């Protein structure tokens, strides 16, 4: 069993390490392949190229996990809402079509994502047994935000004023189903771990947190636990800050990724969960001393608890790969 799996299942108290967005725009070897893939969605579904870029960070940094090169919006694209990625804008989605969304058959949905599962199988064949393979999906709320706003919302969720709460719940329930199916297929294809990204959870008003974030994440985690008891699930409800302990208590994931705004002193370390992440990715852009100092803060804080070293969000495109290499070495040496 890999160090990462051992850590998530509380069998070891070491510090495995991987990074969100570890396969991507900061790597020169990634950029070469990206040039031949103008359409980002097609790139994510390109079996050979997506497999290659998924493995690049392992080959370069000897990390503890491969995370499949993919995107949370593939689910919406597969459910009939076309997604395009435009330079300097990001994702742009066609208008939500409720009829298409609710009437889509499960078989058609997974057929639209079949290459994702083929990519996972191919990665698995090329991944050492000592490494974990991570599959992932967006959480219902985060996908709903993109679905209805059609672009990244930043701090704007005015679109919610135009929709009844009952319709929001209905969409979330439908997304719960599609997300679970996608996770299920990834696990069957060879994913050892699933991470659920609720990237826009911080936009939810506190009074709606239970219905829009906590319950949907809990439902998906419970379904995965029931069907795949040996597959850990990591949740990342970004931006919920002081509500993180309540989220852990209610959702009960195997792992919880914390973002860089979470106050460590307010974390309940007695909960049965493996903590992951926290470091602001901006510390990888500048002075190495500051980067090491900040990394040590997290390593020191979690030294008596199961902890996976990671970031509080994804690696930034302008990151120097040498800084990533130095950080990996620093964490490995701390383990010693």
Image (spheres, grey):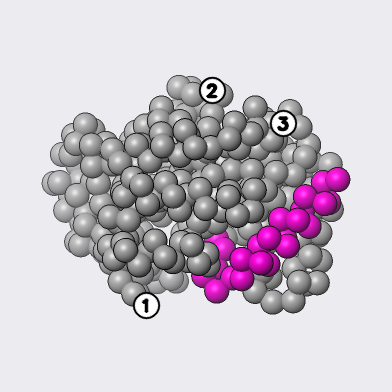
Contact, CB < 8 Å: mark 3 with mark 1? no
Above-or-below relation of 222 to 327: above
Q: Secondary structure at mark 1?
A: loop
Specify the label residue 88 is tagged with: 1
Looking at the image, tell me whether mark 3 or mark 1 is earlier in sequence order. 3
Q: Mark 3, residues whose alpha carbon is within 10 Å: few (<14), some, or many (≥20)? A: some
Q: CA distance from mark 1 to mark 2?
A: 42 Å
Q: Residue at x 69, y 35 (%)?
A: 3
In this view, the mark in front (1 or 2): 1
Q: Which one is nearer the viewer's eye here, 276 or 199?
A: 276
Above-or-below relation of 142 to 135: below
Q: Residue at x 80, y 72 (%)?
A: 289
Q: Is residue 82 visible?
A: yes
Q: Is residue 268 left or right of residue 258?
A: right
Q: Secondary structure at mark 2?
A: loop
Q: Give the percent coordinates (x, y) of residue 38.
A: 29, 66
Q: Give the percent coordinates (x, y) of residue 271.
A: 72, 37
Q: Mark 1, residues whose alpha carbon is within 10 Å: few (<14), some, or many (≥20)? A: few
- In the figure, residue 254 lies in which quadrant? top right
Q: Which one is nearer the viewer's eye here, 272 or 163?
A: 272
Q: Give the percent coordinates (x, y) of residue 161.
A: 31, 65
**Prevailing SS of the magenta stretch:** helix
Give the residue pinned by disc 2: 229
For the image shown, how many numbered marks are present on the structure?
A: 3
Q: Mark 2, residues whose alpha carbon is within 10 Å: few (<14), some, or many (≥20)? A: few
Looking at the image, tell me whether mark 1 or mark 2 is earlier in sequence order. 1
Specify the label residue 303 is tagged with: none
Give the residue pinned by disc 3: 10
Q: Residue at x 27, y 62 (%)?
A: 39
Q: Is residue 166 visible?
A: no
Over which residues does the magenta segment extend? 314-336
Q: CA distance from mark 3 to mark 2?
A: 14 Å
């Amino acid at each position: 069993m890999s160090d990462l799996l051992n850590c998530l299942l509380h069998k070891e108290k070491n510090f495995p390490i991987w990074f969100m967005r570890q396969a991507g725009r900061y790597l020169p070897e990634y950029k070469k392949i990206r040039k031949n893939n103008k359409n980002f969605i097609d790139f994510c579904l390109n079996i050979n190229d997506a497999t290659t870029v998924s493995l690049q960070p392992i080959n370069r940094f000897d990390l503890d996990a491969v995370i499949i090169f993919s995107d949370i919006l593939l689910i919406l694209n597969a459910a009939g809402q076309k997604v395009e990625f435009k330079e300097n804008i990001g994702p742009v989605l066609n208008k939500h079509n409720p009829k298409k969304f609710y009437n889509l058959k499960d078989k058609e949905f997974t057929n639209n994502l079949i290459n994702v599962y083929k990519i996972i199988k191919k990665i698995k064949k090329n991944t050492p047994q000592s490494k974990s393979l991570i599959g992932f999906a967006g959480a219902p709320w985060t996908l709903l935000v993109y679905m209805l706003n059609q672009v990244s919302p930043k701090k704007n969720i005015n679109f919610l004023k135009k929709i009844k709460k009952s319709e929001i719940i209905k969409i979330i329930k439908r997304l719960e189903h599609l997300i679970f199916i996608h996770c299920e297929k990834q696990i069957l294809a060879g994913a050892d771990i699933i991470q659920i990204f609720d990237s826009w959870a911080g936009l939810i008003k506190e009074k709606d947190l239970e219905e829009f974030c906590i319950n949907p994440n809990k439902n998906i985690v419970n379904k995965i636990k029931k069907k795949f008891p040996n597959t850990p699930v990591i949740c990342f409800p970004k931006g919920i800050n002081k509500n993180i302990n309540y989220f852990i208590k209610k959702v009960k994931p195997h792992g919880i990724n914390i973002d860089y705004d979470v106050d460590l002193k307010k974390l309940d370390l007695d909960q049965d969960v493996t903590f992951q992440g926290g470091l602001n990715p901006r510390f990888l852009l500048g002075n190495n001393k500051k980067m090491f100092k900040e990394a040590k803060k997290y390593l020191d804080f979690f030294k008596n608890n199961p902890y996976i070293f990671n970031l509080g969000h994804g690696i930034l495109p302008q990151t120097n790969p040498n800084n990533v290499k130095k950080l990996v070495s620093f964490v490995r040496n701390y383990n010693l």
